[in-house]
Amino acid sequence: MIVQGHAVSKGVATGRILISETPISFLGGIDPKTGEIMEKNHPKNGVSISDRVFLFPNGKGSTVGSYVIYSLKKNNSAPSAMINLASETIVAVGAIISDIPLVDRLERDPFTLFRDGDYVEVDGTRGRVVCNEDDCGVTDHRSL
Protein backbone atom coordinates (compact mmCIF):
# COMPACT_ATOMS: atom_id res chain seq x y z
CA MET A 1 0.00 0.00 0.00
CA ILE A 2 1.33 3.42 -0.96
CA VAL A 3 -0.42 6.46 0.46
CA GLN A 4 0.50 9.70 -1.26
CA GLY A 5 0.82 12.91 0.71
CA HIS A 6 2.80 16.12 0.81
CA ALA A 7 6.57 16.15 1.34
CA VAL A 8 7.63 18.41 4.21
CA SER A 9 11.10 17.19 5.28
CA LYS A 10 13.23 15.10 2.93
CA GLY A 11 14.63 11.68 3.64
CA VAL A 12 13.44 8.11 4.00
CA ALA A 13 13.04 6.19 7.26
CA THR A 14 11.25 3.12 8.51
CA GLY A 15 9.82 2.12 11.83
CA ARG A 16 6.84 1.12 13.89
CA ILE A 17 4.08 3.69 14.16
CA LEU A 18 3.19 5.37 17.43
CA ILE A 19 -0.15 7.16 17.16
CA SER A 20 -1.22 10.21 19.13
CA GLU A 21 -4.69 11.32 18.10
CA THR A 22 -4.19 14.59 19.97
CA PRO A 23 -1.78 17.42 19.09
CA ILE A 24 1.37 17.61 21.18
CA SER A 25 3.68 20.33 22.42
CA PHE A 26 7.33 19.38 22.05
CA LEU A 27 8.31 22.06 24.58
CA GLY A 28 7.31 20.53 27.90
CA GLY A 29 5.42 17.66 26.30
CA ILE A 30 8.39 15.51 25.25
CA ASP A 31 11.50 14.81 27.30
CA PRO A 32 14.35 15.85 24.94
CA LYS A 33 16.77 13.39 26.57
CA THR A 34 14.62 10.26 26.44
CA GLY A 35 11.90 10.99 23.89
CA GLU A 36 9.26 10.13 26.47
CA ILE A 37 5.88 11.85 26.25
CA MET A 38 5.44 13.71 29.51
CA GLU A 39 2.55 16.04 28.67
CA LYS A 40 0.11 15.96 31.56
CA ASN A 41 -3.11 14.07 30.74
CA HIS A 42 -1.81 13.00 27.33
CA PRO A 43 -3.17 9.55 26.37
CA LYS A 44 0.39 8.33 25.61
CA ASN A 45 2.03 9.86 28.70
CA GLY A 46 5.10 7.77 29.58
CA VAL A 47 5.55 6.29 26.08
CA SER A 48 8.72 7.09 24.11
CA ILE A 49 8.65 8.39 20.53
CA SER A 50 12.30 7.41 20.10
CA ASP A 51 12.93 5.40 16.90
CA ARG A 52 9.20 5.31 16.13
CA VAL A 53 7.26 6.78 13.23
CA PHE A 54 5.33 9.36 15.21
CA LEU A 55 1.85 9.97 13.79
CA PHE A 56 0.03 12.95 15.30
CA PRO A 57 -2.34 15.61 13.95
CA ASN A 58 -0.02 18.59 14.49
CA GLY A 59 2.15 20.28 17.04
CA LYS A 60 1.12 23.02 19.40
CA GLY A 61 2.78 25.54 21.64
CA SER A 62 6.02 27.47 21.59
CA THR A 63 8.35 27.90 18.65
CA VAL A 64 11.07 26.50 20.91
CA GLY A 65 9.48 23.13 20.08
CA SER A 66 11.55 23.11 16.88
CA TYR A 67 14.72 23.10 18.96
CA VAL A 68 13.34 20.37 21.21
CA ILE A 69 12.98 18.19 18.10
CA TYR A 70 16.58 19.07 17.23
CA SER A 71 17.66 18.14 20.80
CA LEU A 72 15.85 14.81 20.46
CA LYS A 73 17.91 14.10 17.35
CA LYS A 74 21.18 15.08 19.02
CA ASN A 75 20.32 12.87 22.02
CA ASN A 76 19.46 9.88 19.79
CA SER A 77 15.89 10.02 21.12
CA ALA A 78 14.09 11.37 18.06
CA PRO A 79 11.41 9.61 16.09
CA SER A 80 12.69 7.95 12.92
CA ALA A 81 10.03 9.85 10.95
CA MET A 82 6.82 11.83 11.47
CA ILE A 83 3.39 11.93 9.85
CA ASN A 84 0.95 14.80 10.44
CA LEU A 85 -2.53 15.63 9.26
CA ALA A 86 -1.25 19.14 8.61
CA SER A 87 2.20 20.21 9.75
CA GLU A 88 2.59 23.64 11.21
CA THR A 89 5.80 25.66 11.20
CA ILE A 90 7.12 24.44 14.57
CA VAL A 91 7.13 20.75 13.63
CA ALA A 92 8.15 21.37 10.01
CA VAL A 93 11.20 23.43 10.98
CA GLY A 94 12.15 20.95 13.71
CA ALA A 95 12.01 18.05 11.27
CA ILE A 96 13.97 19.91 8.58
CA ILE A 97 16.82 21.06 10.83
CA SER A 98 16.98 17.56 12.38
CA ASP A 99 16.88 15.59 9.11
CA ILE A 100 13.75 13.71 10.18
CA PRO A 101 11.50 12.70 7.26
CA LEU A 102 8.06 14.29 7.58
CA VAL A 103 4.96 13.83 5.45
CA ASP A 104 1.57 15.44 5.90
CA ARG A 105 -1.78 15.82 4.12
CA LEU A 106 -2.07 12.16 3.16
CA GLU A 107 -4.71 11.35 0.55
CA ARG A 108 -6.45 9.15 3.12
CA ASP A 109 -6.92 9.65 6.85
CA PRO A 110 -3.85 8.04 8.47
CA PHE A 111 -5.76 7.51 11.72
CA THR A 112 -8.06 5.06 9.91
CA LEU A 113 -5.29 3.44 7.85
CA PHE A 114 -2.71 2.70 10.52
CA ARG A 115 -2.53 1.22 14.01
CA ASP A 116 0.08 1.47 16.72
CA GLY A 117 2.90 -0.89 15.82
CA ASP A 118 2.36 -0.97 12.05
CA TYR A 119 5.70 -1.06 10.26
CA VAL A 120 5.95 1.64 7.57
CA GLU A 121 8.38 3.53 5.39
CA VAL A 122 8.04 7.30 5.37
CA ASP A 123 9.45 8.88 2.23
CA GLY A 124 9.69 12.59 2.93
CA THR A 125 11.33 13.19 -0.43
CA ARG A 126 8.47 11.76 -2.49
CA GLY A 127 5.80 12.66 0.05
CA ARG A 128 4.41 9.21 0.71
CA VAL A 129 4.00 6.44 3.25
CA VAL A 130 4.53 2.81 2.21
CA CYS A 131 3.24 -0.17 4.15
CA ASN A 132 3.26 -3.86 3.20
CA GLU A 133 -0.12 -5.57 3.54
CA ASP A 134 1.15 -7.87 6.27
CA ASP A 135 2.43 -4.93 8.30
CA CYS A 136 -0.61 -2.60 8.22
CA GLY A 137 -3.80 -2.34 10.20
CA VAL A 138 -6.02 -1.79 7.17
CA THR A 139 -8.39 -4.71 6.86
CA ASP A 140 -9.42 -4.30 3.21
CA HIS A 141 -6.47 -3.37 1.01
CA ARG A 142 -8.46 -3.80 -2.21
CA SER A 143 -10.18 -0.46 -1.62
CA LEU A 144 -6.88 1.45 -1.63
Image (tube, rainbow, N blue to C red):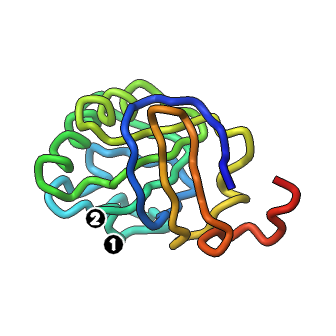
- Residue 114 is marked as none
Q: Nearer the viewer, residue 109 or 144?
A: 144
User: How far is mark 1 from mark 2, CA to CA?
Assistant: 6 Å
Is label 1 in contact with label 2 (beta carbons under 8 Å)? Answer: yes
Q: Nearer the viewer, residue 137 or 126?
A: 126
Which residue is pictured at 36% across the width and 29% down the height? 90
Residue at numbered disc 2: 36
Which residue is pictured at 44% across the width and 39% down the height? 102
Three-letter amino acid code at disc 2? Glu
Element class at badge 2: loop
Element class at badge 1: loop
Which residue is pictured at 57% across the width and 41% down the height? 128
Which residue is pictured at 33% across the width and 72% down the height? 46
Q: Quadrant of the N terminus?
A: bottom right
Three-letter amino acid code at disc 1? Gly
Q: Classify residue 49 by image quadrant.
A: bottom left
| Residue 108 left/right relative to 88 | right
- Residue 46 is marked as 1
